Image: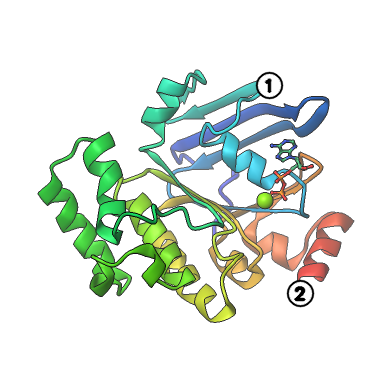
Amino acid sequence: MADSNNSVSNDEILLSVRHLKKSYGDHEVLRDISFDVPRGKVFVLLGPSGSGKSTLIRCLNGLETIQGGTISFKGEPIDGREKTWRRLRTEIGMVFQSYDLFPNLTVAQNILLGPTKVQKRPKDEVERQMDGLLADVQLSEYRDAYPRELSGGQKQRIAIVRALTMNPELMLFDEVTASLDPEMVREVLELMLGLAEHHMTMIVVTHEMEFARRVADTVLFLENGVILERQSGHDFFTHPETDRAKAFLESMA
Ligand code: ADP
Ligand code: MG
């Protein structure tokens, strides 16, 4: 796969982060983070626990205030107001480790909520799209089920379908398989691999190294809130540059 940091590439930059700083009180959690994500590419964020991966993902969805730097989406710097983020969250989808489906709503009601209430799209159009996506992930029969009737893997696939039904241009994934039983991990990863094949732009935090190796155009390796290493997926997994990244990969093997 091509290294998306190649300076001769003419790819459109979908997301651009410049000198991003985030702290909690005196604790600097992200320090001078800069990177560009071209449209259609998959970035995998790796790094030890506490290195700042979740905080970075949350900053990219406006869930954290930032103390410095800029985040630009489609060439426009984001002003940081909640109103702006509310609009952008329909274009930047996010799925977390914990299943965040509404327990009192059916699968279909969970999925339809954002597109019909926030995006104000016609219900029949959204339903057609939802039914297609549910069929793709082989969950059509659960359309009217409640989240409690679903396995963890099924819930995560529904959470992904729900995000996709908003037609996002960028998807953020933070350890979406971390609380799943091993036999359910694969069905979720396969859905994500399918998205990558369809050129969905994605930023993915994962502990699944085989998946990361397959899906990553670019790896950003974080430690202590800085990008210690930035490589194509292939190069990172075959010859990491830093001792820290080597030790990390060994610890994950
Ligand atoms: P990772 O996802 O890589 O494990 P996190 O982004 O969750 O790392 O955390 C990075 C650092 O920020 C850690 O030191 C963590 O303790 C700290 N941190 C995360 N969230 C908060 C918070 N809400 N308040 C204070 N410190 C936090
Ligand atoms: Mg985390």
Rendering colour mode: rainbow
What residue is at 54 percent from the left and 63 percent from the top?
Answer: 215
Pointer 1 local density, CA inside 10 Å: few below 14, some 14–19, many at least 20: some
Residue beneath disc 2? 253
Pointer 2 local density, CA inside 10 Å: few below 14, some 14–19, many at least 20: few
Residue placed furthest toward the front: 104
Q: Where is residue 207 in the image (x, y as percent from the top left)?
A: 66, 64
Residue type, label 1: Gln
Q: In which quarter of the image is residue 146?
A: bottom left
Secondary element under disc 2, as helix, strand or loop, is loop
Q: Which mark sits nearer the N-terminus, 1 or 2? A: 1
Q: In which quarter of the image is ligand 1?
A: top right
Secondary element under disc 1, as helix, strand or loop, is loop
* Whether residue 72 is situated above or below residue 210 in the rendered picture: above
Residue placed furthest toward the bottom: 183
Residue beneath disc 1? 67
Question: The N terminus lies in which quarter of the figure?
Answer: bottom right
